[in-house]
Image (cartoon, rainbow, N blue to C red):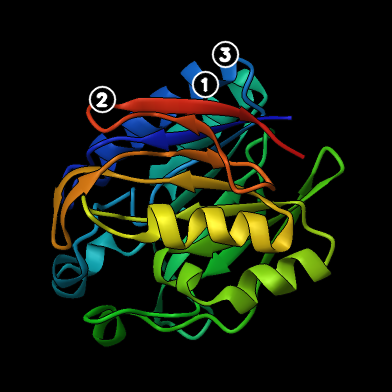
Amino acid sequence: MIVAAAQFAPVAGDIDANVRTVAGLIRDAGADGARLVVFAELCLTGYEPSLIRDTPALVLSEDDARLEPVRDACRAVGAAAVVNGPVRTADGSTGVTSLVIDADGSLLARYDKRHLYGIEQEVFAPGGSDGRFTLDGVRFATATCYDNRFPELAERAAADGCTVYLASSVLVAGNDSFEKVYPVRARDFGLHVVLGNALGPSEEGVACGGAGAWGPDGERLADAGSERQGYALAEVG
């Protein structure tokens, strides 16, 4: 299976603009053969916890009409997508949530970030379960940024039959995760690790791109670079 690890610079607080970019990247990656496209943490709003806290309209629902262009793009090219944003939970709180949209536009899975970092703890509610889904017979795990600092998530994923670990993150230049987290999770647990990262400024700083993938031996398989919007393709599974 070919997976696309995507990156772009979200517009802070502009869901419609970010959805257009996400949908365009899904269409492009699907045309390039990707069966799944993975995006950065909070790609739908930008990584802006304070803005999300102060702007209730930025919180989405699972079936939010604003995401219809994403669903349309998935249907158009027969690709699934992992998109992340602030999404309302069953109890009315807000999660840092990955929605897995299937190739038919339906919701295949949802994952709420378990380990919140810094100001996130004031704005969001932590999730209580691991993220899993199966696509074309391949079992995937989902995790979000700071989650990846906890090796037990990847350990449980491997023990649960997952062969691909999807990380939606916002990493700035100099973050040691590129050397000390993602390749180590891949190598230690025999997983393909796929990173969707952001570009450009946010509340966290200036994201550095580098979306891509590592093989089960910990070696880089794909890298989208540090400058341009786009994606890197990797064969996984």
Callout 2: SS: loop
The earlier-in-sequence mark between 2 and 1 is 1
Q: Amino acid at mark 1?
A: Ala
The picture places residue 32, in percent across and down from the top left corner, at 57, 13
The picture places residue 80, in percent across and down from the top left corner, at 63, 36
Judged left or right of residue 52, residue 140 is: right
Tag 3 near tag 1, CB within 8 Å = yes
Q: Residue at x 48, y 72 (%)?
A: 147
Gap between marks 3 and 1 measured at Cα: 5 Å
Judged left or right of residue 109, residue 160 is: right
Q: Which is in the foreground here, disc 2 or disc 1?
A: 2
Q: Residue at x 22, y 28 (%)?
A: 227
Q: Of the numbered discs in the image, which one, if any, rests on residue 29?
A: 1
Q: Residue at x 52, y 77 (%)?
A: 150
Q: Of the numbered discs in the image, which one, if any, rests on residue 228?
A: 2
Quadrant for residue 230, please give it: top left
Q: Residue at x 33, y 49 (%)?
A: 44
Q: Of the numbered discs in the image, which one, if any, rests on residue 32?
A: 3
Residue 125 visible here: yes
Could you tell me which quadrant the N terminus lies in?
A: top right
Quadrant for residue 213, please give it: top right
Q: Amino acid at mark 3?
A: Asp
The picture places residue 110, in percent across and down from the top left corner, at 60, 62
Name the one closer to the observer, 26 or 164: 164
Callout 1: SS: helix
Q: Which is in the foreground here, disc 3 or disc 2?
A: 2
Callout 3: SS: loop
